[in-house]
Amino acid sequence: MKEAEIRRLSAANLLCVLSVILTAVVPPFFWDGFTVLGTHLAWLCVCSVCVSTLNIILHLVLKPNLSPKRISFAHKISRFLKCCVYFFMSCILFHAIIVLYGAPLIESVTETFLFAVLLSTFTTLQCLCMLGPNIQAWIRVFSKNGATSIWESNLQITTICSIFGAWFGAFPIPLDWDRPWQVWPISCSLGATFGYVAGLIIAPLWIHWNRKQLTYKSR
Amino acid sequence: MRLRSGVFASSCLLMEALGVALFLRGFFRHYAGTIRTSCNHGSSLFLGTVSNWTKIPPPLFKKVVIVLIDSLRDDFLFGPKGKQFMPYTAQAVEKGTSYSFIAEAKPPTVTMPRIKALMTGSIPGFIDVIMNLNSPALLDDNLIWQAKTSGKRIIFYGDDTWIKLFPKYFVEYDGTTSFFVSDFTEVDNNVTRHLDRVLKREDWDLLILHYLGLDHIGHLTGPNSPLVGLKLSEMDNILKKIHISLISKEEASLPNLLVVCGDHGMSETGSHGGSSEGEVRTPLLFISSAFEKRSDPLTQPELVQQTDLASTLAVGLGLPIPRNSVGKLIWPVVGGKTMREQLRFVHLNGFQLSRLLQENTPAYEKGKSAKKKSYAQKEISHGNWIKLYLEGNNSEILLNFGKKVLKQYLEALKTLSSSLSKQVAQYDVYSMLVGAVIIMEVLLLLLLSIPKALSSRAEFEVPLSPPLFSLLFYLMCLVLCAVHVIVCTSAESLCYFCSLSWLTAVGVMMLISVLMCGILSTIARVFENSRLPLKNPVVSSSNWSEIDLLIVTGTLVHVLSLGASSFIEEEHQTWYFLINTLCLVLCQELCRNNFLLKEWDPQHSTTVKQNFDRIGEVSECKNIDILATSNSKLGKTTSSAGFIKGSDKWISLASPWIILICCRLLRSLNQTGVQWAHRPDFGHWLTSSEHKSELSFLAAVSLLMVFFLVQRRCSLVSKIAMALGLLGVYSYRAAIGNVVFPWQHDSQDISKGITEARFVYVFVLGIVFTGTKDILKSQVISADSSVKNTGLWEVYSGLVLLAALLFRPHNLPVLVFCLLIQTIMTKYIWRPLNCDATQITIMHYWFGQAFFYFQGNSNGLATVDVTAGFVGLESYVEIPAVFLTAFATYAGPLLWAIHLLCYLSSEDSRNSVAVSHGSFCYALMRSIPVAIYIVLVTGLRYHLFIWSVFSPKLLYEGVHVFITTAICLFFTAMDQNHSHKVQD
Ligand SMILES: [Zn+2]
Ligand SMILES: [Zn+2]
């Protein structure tokens, strides 16, 4: 059971990694002059859209949090709308935090906001898929020993890695190398992406490694 | 010997301060002036036997006028601004009989060292910047001295730095002080008013004018303000007047020369001191009818060194070249003469340079140096040429041969000059080494003592007596003394540490040995303890809270960042980043305290969402055991249960966000650093003259806020004193014209505001005195801690008042936010979270560092606000000026440190060792970056940016160590009382 679950998880994660790589590789074939650094905003959009679509599809296919009871259609709709609102709010919150960290308030609002969207895609969207708009569950998952399944452990690891990646991505900005990737917000968004990819790769390995210690109590 | 950790920390810091002082002394070796015998008449070697010219060549110019425009950047003269605002000069540059160059100034681009460079041709040491405030007479051989001894009459008008540098050399002078930076017109009119009279007269040979107005405009409004254009037009008219007068007076005998130059440029913000392109590139323009009219269109002016001016002018005036000049002749200026004269000039210059090189390199003496050989060859060909010339050979061959020799000479001059410039950067490695060893040993000792010193006893057993009588100690002492003797007797170069008395040197050696033995025996004891099985293991990382994790990572990140020059330039970014993260982690901690320990309440969903986001921000929450924190935090759970109480909870949850917003506002108040320093910021907007009423309003509101934030814990008397003092601050600012009173809109007479400032000083002293009295009372008579706390708070508020006086008015919000954040943190974060003394100390240290940059400071010297040293003083008085400047610069860290003491001693009842832990931690936080930085700087001492980036930072670090030592001693003095009480 557990082994099969881990295999499914790694397959899903590998798909996500692949999608991130594809967003950098595929578009130039259709779109002249598309590069990750040159047309960074376009890449941000493409990456966010791809990762979020894939996440939603995977969620629908794999159904990690198998809920036994059937839910009414209206309930589903309201749930979906709630998710959208939450996602938007998390974008705004990330934007505010980035500005508090020193991003310009008035200039390059688009860049900052798209970066916030990317971060939300890597973090909030996954939580919404996995846990739904249920803050209580979020708190539980992100507190000590709160994960109840390997999917939730995976969620913890990827989210934290993405945010750490973004945090470390800010470091090269003050260096005077005058490289194209030092422009705001490229290094941060690249850092977040690398962190996300690293999280996706690390999570199954870590879970596999620690599968003896991980004893998930059922709810 | 058993020491409390506070005492231990301050004694460590004292030793460290000694080490830092030694290191700084070695790093910035200060050249005392050399004897000024300039006997390079150049009739040396064999040339004398060949040539019949043995005297100094006669002057090329009759009268020379040097117009030095402070902060004149190259594009002000040669760029579009020059064409627009300086039409006459621009025409002279393009079509007239002139030569234009871009003279590169070496950093530090501050006026006094630059004047020295222009007049001596040498590169002044970095330490000259410090002396800039208080310029003593120049002892080096210089152009002015040479001119005076050869009977030239010199007239000077302008910046009085010159008069301090060259006392009694001018037959006539009028100095203007650069004290009032806000004065654009008066400083220059004071110079120009003499001009008409002097130009009519014939009784002078050298006229020097130093105009300060442009520099003042730059400092206040930046290089792009319309005022710059006006000033440039004014300068253009003056140059026109001088030039016309010089031409009209020219007789058949000798032409006159007009030199226009700048001492340094200005950066995009209008300040100077660093090494950005705008700061180092200054124009250098020679206008004389002796030059050929320019025929070809002007290309980009040639790049020369600022030091080249001294030798060129010396030749032009027929004077010996200053002895320590590393400059080379600016060729075209003397190029109009006959070949023989030209060769003579370059020979003079080459002779002087090679002798200087000879004096500075031992290898040169033995004739090993390739440079010497090549130079000697040129001299031989010169001799041959003169032989041919004297034989009366006057053909084409002679001319071509002469040209060849000349070319070779010029090349040789270039190599000589550049190798000499490099030579200046020599270090006193031995003193540096001794200092660094002391600092590293102190750091090691501090690090090794962490577990003991931060334990609940807060005591550290200093292993002193066993090593003092051990063989190792005596052996080390002996070896070190032997090394000292060997180094000091063999070294040719002057070494500061060797020049100390033998007793002191032996004392330092003993100190090093004692520290070494102390470290060794501490290590031995640690090993012994670890072998004991029942000892519980060192605090493992799993019990660390996120705050601990962040503190450790942050310290490491900051220390590592010091290795990169751009991170030093942008160090404020590191600190802002760290305190932001700290606030977010605190927010997460608060949320967890509020929500997870209590029963879950679904209605708090929105806040919890933030909570979630914060959790993600931090670290692997999974591994972290919330409740099982280290022993010292056992009381946490119990107290935090009582903490949640209605509205307080929400304020507490919001407080990190308020602090974050405050920090963001402060960040946009002063744009500092290098890369983004030119960005518009709120501070510049406020200081511009059209926003005076906004600035006045802001200053008034800030002073009011300061009063409300400070007064709540003061006694009634100090409350009144504080209010009056803050009123005094406002009227002082109004008196010197920074702000206006609402009822008087036209600023009439601007005074120095001496009375107002002294009025405030009286209150500062009064409040501090009251506070000290309270502390002493609690110390001597009653052991009442509340009296002591009030006393401490009063000392603190006195310092706040002093800071309010010294801060520039647009920086007053920094003070307000400082107090606000301290209040919020004390009330809603530290008390509820029950942070331990270590964490609070480090947070204070971080915020102190961040506020250092919020104030507008940077790691460059240009941002030091020297005007703070003149507040309330008639003229420059060294000790108060240095003290006030240091206080104003380090006000942020200092206020946070004193607040830390207030806070910790008010927590005394709960945690009796808090102050002790605090001072130990504070010492540790200071020692780590200093020690690492000193190692880095020693390694990078030949780095390209050593003088522009690393050295100013080293000075800042050094001064910070001295200040921290003082603070730590104060801490210990406050803590001493407690230890008495315990013994009773
Ligand atoms: Zn200057
Ligand atoms: Zn200046």
Image (cartoon, grey):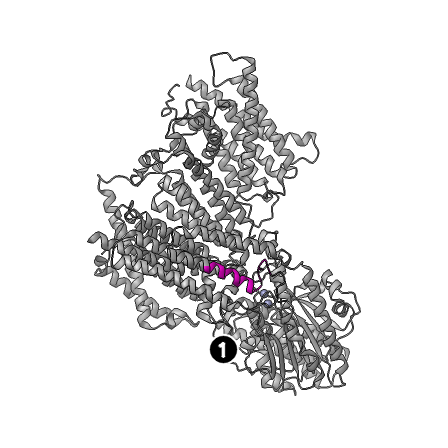
Q: A216 or B913, which lies in front?
A: B913
What range of the chain is rendered magenta? B724-743
Residue B562 image point, x, y percent: 47, 52
Q: Residue at x 42, y 58 (%)?
A: B720
Q: Quadrant of residue B620?
A: top left
Would residue A156 be counted in the magenta stretch?
A: no
Amino acid marked by disc 1 = Thr
Q: Residue at x 60, y 44 (%)?
A: A183
Taking the image as shown, residue B845 lies to the left or right of residue A114, namely left
Residue B761 image point, x, y percent: 44, 64
What kind of secondary structure does the magenta stretch mostly adopt?
A: helix
Q: Which residue sits furthest left?
A: B984
Q: Write down the residue under mark 1.
A: B34
**Helix or strand or loop: what does disc 1 sit on?**
loop
Q: B962 or B403, which lies in front?
A: B962
Asked whether the viewer can see residue B954, the reply is no
Residue B184 image point, x, y percent: 64, 67
Chain letter for mark 1: B
Q: Quadrant of residue B291?
A: bottom right
Quadrant position of the N terminus of chain B in the picture: bottom left
Asked whether the viewer can see residue B922, the reply is yes
